[in-house]
Structures are given as structure tokens and as C-alpha cells.
Image (cartoon, rainbow, N blue to C red):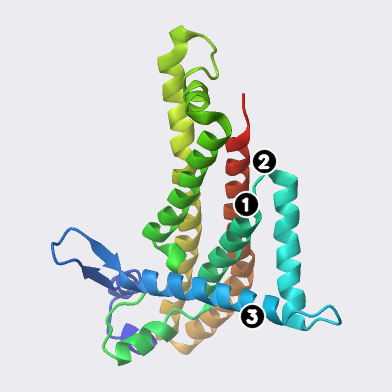
Amino acid sequence: MVADSQQMTSQSYIEHHLTNLTSTSSDGGWIFHLDSLFFSISLGVLFLWLFYSVAKKSTTGVPGKLQCFVELIVEFVDKSVKESYHGKSQLIAPLALTIFVWVFLMNLMDLIPVDWLPQLAHAVGIEYLKVVPSTDLNITFSLSLGVFALVIFYSLKAKGPVGFIKELTLSPFNHWLFIPVNFILESVTLLAKPVSLGLRLFGNMYAGELIFILIALMYSADWMIGLLGIGLHVGWAIFHILVITLQAFIFMMLTIVYLSMAHEDH
């Protein structure tokens, strides 16, 4: 909140914007980030409603701008799946489309000025509000763990339990003496997939949000620094459009590649 930032230290202003709205379960064992849950679910519903509405109203004649935009995204994702996925599944293309658009929408929230929504929330008595779900490690890891569960499922489906165990124990060294070494190496490789997938998205988006917050601090200084802050804000926002799109694309492509690898039999 720009007005409140004049009464707050820089450290407290940054900490305030990086603090989630939380709720603790009755037994004290669970802590829910209500803002991350609200915005991520709302954006997921927005994606489903938007694409369903366009599909329902689509025409074979001259399409509207929104239909052209949606068809462009669908064709782009479909082409990416065909080029990278080597298995046979009708789930992968819809999954890739969902991941790309959903992650993009969550990242897109980063372009909203950092004080606008928290200030509105403050006006109705909500003290903390983080509006970018992908800057919450719980959200990015939830997405990556969902992908990891599908990797395990398709590995077992394509290779069977015995084949999956063989892959973990007889690769890369195909000898029974190296089974412990193979298991350690393959387990680390397998577990690194969801960790890297979740951390990559979180790290890039968290850093981008932090830069926006630091730029917002400049508005509370004198007018010359404030003008510089406006210029920096616009410049970083334009560059960040590339970042949020690229991060959604990388998350989608890694998901496709991991699921494709799950179908490969060594």
C-alpha cells in the first residue's frame, strides 16, 4: 500500500507484501494459504469457463478475435505435444493445455500493481494478501507433485511394476552387482523432476514479484525518484510479459517430456 508505505519501514513493507493470508486448522496441524487457494482456483475456473464458452460458441465461418486467440493457443499446444510426446494418450494434450493456460494466468497476476489488490483487501479488513499464486511454493509444488504422480502412473502402465523396478535397479549399469548404485542414481533422477519443476517456477516468479515490490518502494520517495520508479515499473512489466509466458511454456514442455520419458522402455 503506497500510502501506508510512508509509515512503514522498507523491510516491513516488503515483508507485508510477501506474507500470505493464512488460516490454521482446528487441530493446528494444517496451515492454509487462503489467498493462494482463492486466486489459483478462481483462475482455474476462469480458464475452464472461457475455453468452454468459446468452444460452445465457435463457428466455421469467420471467427471472432477471442475464438482466433483460443484456437491459436490450442494449435500451439497441440503441435508441441505432437513434437515432444511419443506415447499414445488422449490425456496429454488437454493436460498440457490446462497447465500452460493455468500457469500463465497465475503468472499474469504479477502484472497487477503490487498495491492495488492488497489495498482493496485492507479496506475490507483483510491484513495480508498475496495475489500471485505461483510465488507460493505450496502451489508450485502441488502442480509438480501432480505431474510426478502422472509420471509414476504412466511408467507403471507402460512398463508394468516389474519393468518399472528393473528400470530403477538395472539402469544405467545392467549388472546385479550395481543394483544399489543404480537404485540410488535413478531415485535421485526421478525425485529431482518434481523438485526442479516446482522450484524453477517458484524461483522465477518470486524474484519477479520481489523486484516489483522494490520498485514500488520508490513511489514513497521524492517525485524525481517516483518518476524513475514509474519508468522502471513499465520497463520491468514489459520484460516480465516474456518471463511469465516463458515460465508457463517451460512448465508445460517439461511435463510433456517427463510423461513421454515415462512411456519409453529401456
Please say whether residue 111 is visible from this viewpoint: yes
Looking at the image, which residue is at 40% across and 16% down?
A: 180
Where's residue 219, x and y in %?
A: 44, 84
Choose top left, top right, bottom left or bottom right for residue 16: bottom left
Looking at the rendered image, the quarter that the C terminus falls into is top right
What amino acid is at disc 3?
A: Ser
Label 2: few (<14), some (14–19) or many (≥20) C-alpha neighbours in 10 Å: some
Where's residue 86, x and y in %?
A: 70, 40
* Disc 2 from disc 1: Cα separation: 9 Å
Q: Nearer the viewer, residue 143 or 161?
A: 161
Q: Nearer the viewer, residue 57 or 122?
A: 57
Q: Tell me if label 1 and label 3 are in contact, CB under 8 Å.
A: no
Q: Tell me if label 2 and label 1 are in contact, CB under 8 Å.
A: yes
Q: Give the left or right position of residue 266, taking residue 202 as reference.
A: right
Label 1: few (<14), some (14–19) or many (≥20) C-alpha neighbours in 10 Å: some
What amino acid is at disc 1?
A: Ile
Looking at the rendered image, the quarter that the N terminus falls into is bottom left
**Residue assigned mark 1:** 92
Q: Nearer the viewer, residue 225 or 78?
A: 78
Vertical placement of residue 206 versus 187, above or below: below
Q: Give the left or right position of residue 248, taking residue 219 as reference.
A: right
Label 3: few (<14), some (14–19) or many (≥20) C-alpha neighbours in 10 Å: few
Q: Give the left or right position of residue 134, taking residue 35 as reference.
A: right
- For residue 208, the mark is none
Vertical placement of residue 220 versus 109, above or below: below
**Residue assigned mark 3:** 53
Looking at the image, which residue is at 44% across and 14% down?
A: 179
- For residue 87, the mark is 2
Looking at the image, which residue is at 41% across and 53% down?
A: 141
What amino acid is at disc 2?
A: Gly
Q: Tell me if label 2 and label 3 are in contact, CB under 8 Å.
A: no
